[in-house]
Each structure stands twice: as C-alpha cells, then as structure tokens.
Image (cartoon, rainbow, N blue to C red):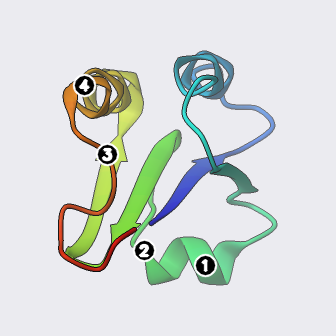
Amino acid sequence: MKIMLFTTPTCQYCTPAKELLADTEGVEIINALENQDLAGMYGIRSVPSLVVEKCSGTNVFVGLDQIAKYVDESANASGGCGCSCGH
C-alpha cells in the first residue's frame, strides 16, 4: 500500500491535513508544484489531496473533510490492502 499527500507551500489547509495524518504510517508528503507529472497521473487538481494506492485500486481523497473521513475509517479498519496479497 502506498499513501501520498499532495500539498503546496501556500496551501492553508495542507498543514492541518498533515496533522490529521501524523499517526498514519508511511505517508509520503509530495509538493504538487514540484511533481506536476505525478500529480497529473493521479488527476490532482487541488490540494490537499490524499492518494491511497492499494492492490485493489486507487482512491483519491480531496480536502480536509475527505481526508479526515479516511483517517477515521482507517482507524477502525483491520489494516492492510484489503486483499489477499499480505500487505
């Protein structure tokens, strides 16, 4: 599983998004301005955006509300990818 938080230096909601994800293991913080090709690959058009890539597919959570919902749901989940790969 790969978790990426797309941010920009001037985004007022990106710091709170980072704080929401502080206890989430393995989150990669990506500057969307410096990584426009990667942001484009995932269809990132606004920040903060959280990309969660699993064996079963990729989910994109845009904005603090969606990121907070992901954090709440993942805290109650059993962990891993949700498939039989063992991740």
N-term mark: 1 or 3: 1
- How many marks overall? 4
Q: Position of residue 82 (x, y in %)?
A: 19, 61
**Do callouts 1 and 2 mark residues in contact (Cβ within 8 Å)?**
yes
Question: Circle 4 is placed at which residue position?
Answer: 69
Question: Circle 1 is placed at which residue position?
Answer: 38
Q: Foreground: 7 or 50?
A: 50
Q: Foreground: 39 or 5?
A: 5
The answer to whether residue 64 is seen in the rendering is yes
Residue 42 - label? 2
Which of the 4 image quadrants contains residue 37?
A: bottom right
Say what secondary structure mark 2 lies in: loop
The image quadrant where one finds the C terminus is bottom left
The image quadrant where one finds the N terminus is bottom left
Residue 79 - label? 3
Q: Is residue 39 above or below residue 21?
A: below
Please name the residue shown 29% across and 34% down the image. 74
Amino acid under disc 4? Lys
**Do callouts 1 and 3 mark residues in contact (Cβ within 8 Å)?**
no
N-term mark: 1 or 4: 1
Q: CA distance from mark 3 to mark 2?
A: 23 Å
Please name the residue shown 27% across and 20% down the image. 72
Which numbered mark, 4 or 3, is in the foreground of this view?
A: 3
